[in-house]
Amino acid sequence: MIAENYKEMLNGKSVIRELFTYATERGKEIGYENVFDYSLGNPSVEPPKNFTQAMIDLLQHADPMLLHGYSPTLGNPVFREKTAASLARRFGIPYTAEDIFPTTGAAGAIAHAVRAVTVPGDEIITFAPFFPEYSPYINLTGASLKIVPPRVEDFQIHFEAFEEMINEKTMAVLINTPNNPSGIVYSTETIQKLTAVLTQKSEEYGHTIYIISDEPYREIVFDGVDAPCVSQYYANTLVCYSFSKSLSLPGERIGYIAVNPACKDSALIINMCGQISRGIGHNCPPSIIQLAVAEVIDETSDLSVYETNMNLLYKELTNLGFTCVKPGGTFYIFPKALEEDAKIFSEKAKKYDLMLVPGDSFGCPGYFRMAYCIDTEKVERSLVQLRKFVKECYGVQ
Amino acid sequence: MIAENYKEMLNGKSVIRELFTYATERGKEIGYENVFDYSLGNPSVEPPKNFTQAMIDLLQHADPMLLHGYSPTLGNPVFREKTAASLARRFGIPYTAEDIFPTTGAAGAIAHAVRAVTVPGDEIITFAPFFPEYSPYINLTGASLKIVPPRVEDFQIHFEAFEEMINEKTMAVLINTPNNPSGIVYSTETIQKLTAVLTQKSEEYGHTIYIISDEPYREIVFDGVDAPCVSQYYANTLVCYSFSKSLSLPGERIGYIAVNPACKDSALIINMCGQISRGIGHNCPPSIIQLAVAEVIDETSDLSVYETNMNLLYKELTNLGFTCVKPGGTFYIFPKALEEDAKIFSEKAKKYDLMLVPGDSFGCPGYFRMAYCIDTEKVERSLVQLRKFVKECYGVQ
């Protein structure tokens, strides 16, 4: 029989996808270069040339049987070693290969991490504004996602609401810093306060409360921003990483879980991931991609365009009177709409060929997200439209 | 808290993996060329040169942003179209792109198929001997796997036992033809009889009973063997395919689900797969692999070595007095051991550097599997050891 829960999900439409589809259709009418599509978080810069060259070298020179053969259950040893060494070097945490489990991007990492530290009925807490896919990611495991309301003045954590929500069923908190959609980076103060609460509550409840730290934007942090490494502050941290943004490879599905070696269950959790894979049809990311990424483990795409774009947008938005917290990283900005219902605001913006995603699905109504992973030249042209839009619709001069 | 069910799974050791590890260690002592390792089902022939060339061409000439960008939720359209056209051409079933969902190999395909047509508490029936990974694949979804005992005279289906086992909770049967571990291909008669039972029982119970047809060995069928296309006989068939064996790409994780377009829920099931992915962290197989495989969709590796090896082994085994059903495909053969406990038989064979997997974990004690995806020259040398082994241990002349 057809599984009704998945069937019903088909009725829920993604606002982001709908906007993107509208933008694509509109592009056919007026040229896509004239549609200011801030809807999708797709990287806009090329992968490093060394990645492409590593792929070609492997195809031309490696033994094809080894290159394309099954990865071991826990992933390719070279990928695991190079990842651990890179993390150890950069963050001063003594990761070894045994603490790393390669996954199909951050989605695959979260799928494993949640199953490792919860059973159906348990709760995981996250903080609005949050990536809307967290709901199906968590809720379809049988655990349930609880959402702490946003602290809109700076998009750091609303601790009062958090402490009301945490309880004995809480097995993990899921954080995302730098954050999609706000672009905010949690400060050292925020992380210290969070880990203090978790340490105290772990003791009170008699079980570990893990941090699942979703870090696909870790390499996109802007100049001078305080961007603490979460795992340095809390041993029971499972980092979920993806190379989608740092190497501009979202379609190649490559990331990892890194369990802090100081976490008492580190080796156990990594080994359990190999078992979890069997139930979810995962069986390691593609072999050739693991090997090629291992070759460029310390590189990134040229990510500077995102900061350039952010500065242009932030300046214009604040000039136009928007309430807007300045992003510390990512390629998102999350201003307050100029009327209460951001969905209506977004609908009006479409008439000016500006694709702005209302914040409702991110758990933050009244705000809107702009994904500025587009060419700077296009950002500049969009400002003209933005000015026209707010002047004509909201009387802003 | 640590999820105990996955933790407990760590105590269950894979006999196949243990044998393989032993073989690797033994190889360090006497040279791996002298270890007759029939343990693992890893392809032993190279991928087609055109696959490698397609990969290089994509890396050198395609727009890297499109090449490595996110696949749409339901997979790359080119891959879906070419796969559908190839299947339609070969099997006369009018598949279109809308009936195809790309997955990370057959494991990913089964993970989606099972979740689409069952809910926790439902049952899926499979037939021994069977691929042991089916147990975690199914049981970790919350559905449960029921195993029909083998019909050892020919390894076709034991229908009496099957009809006793099928009941109102049965939502699907999972078949694997050509079969791992027996090498047997289900005959047209078997398929007709199976589909007749399923049609009748679907009507009796008032719900569809699906066939989930796991077909990674579809392209490895030996000369003159009756190898019916299951989907031609039963509309409610979900084919789970992998290119791991046909293109020798097991590590690149590429396969698909193909739902027969005559299945009344075809479009629904494929769309549901896109939702199922969100809960299991799947999000499409790697983009570049989808595109490169689409370029060689009608090709295979040179698979002829497997039939050569099978004939050598089958002849020698029957000469030595083994009871053995002649394989119709795959790269496995599944003879009866020369003593009741195949684990003891396998242990004795290790002393002759022959790695034979006892049939217990395949649901068929007393038999053993040989995976003859190795060089023919090595198969020939192994026959000397095999003769020595059965002569010295079992007095066979």
Image (cartoon, coloured by chain):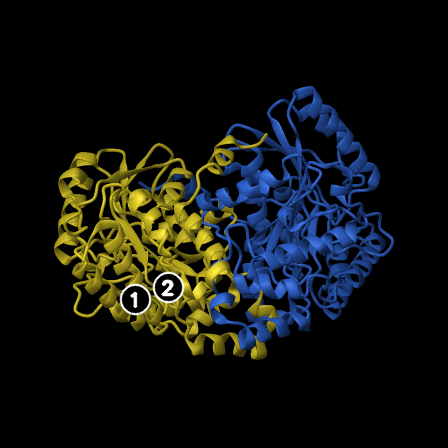
Chain colours: A yellow, B blue
Q: Position of residue B185 (x, y in %)?
A: 78, 46
Residue A245: which disc? 2
Q: Which image quadrant for residue B156?
A: top right
Q: Nearer the viewer, residue A62 or B93?
A: B93
| Residue under the point 57% across and 45% down | B133
Disc 1 designates what residue?
A: A219
Q: Position of residue B260 (x, y in %)?
A: 69, 42
Q: Position of residue B182 (x, y in %)?
A: 73, 47
Looking at the image, tell me whether mark 1 or mark 2 is earlier in sequence order: 1
Compared with B292, B342 (above or below) is: above
Question: Which residue is outermost to the right?
Answer: B224
| Residue under the point 69% across and 25% down | B202
Classify mark 2: helix, strand or loop.
Answer: loop
Left or right: where B304 falls relative to B357: right
Q: Position of residue B221 (x, y in %)?
A: 78, 54
Residue B173: which disc? none
* Classed neighbour count for the residue bearing mark 1: other residues with Cα under 10 Å, few (<14), some (14–19), many (≥20): some
Please report contact status of discs 1 and 2: CB closer than 8 Å, yes or no.
yes
Left or right: where A237 falls relative to A37: left
Compared with A314, A7 (above or below) is: above
Q: Which image quadrant for residue A147?
A: top left
Dots 1 and 2 on the same chain: yes
Classify mark 1: helix, strand or loop.
Answer: loop
| Residue under the point 73% across and 62% down | B298
Q: Nearer the viewer, residue A143 or B148?
A: A143
Image quarter where the C terminus of chain A lies is bottom left
Q: Chain of mark 2?
A: A
Image quarter where the N terminus of chain A lies is top right
Question: Disc 2 residue type?
Answer: Lys
Q: Is residue B18 visible?
A: yes
Q: Which image quadrant for residue B110?
A: top right
Left or right: where A285 falls relative to A133: right
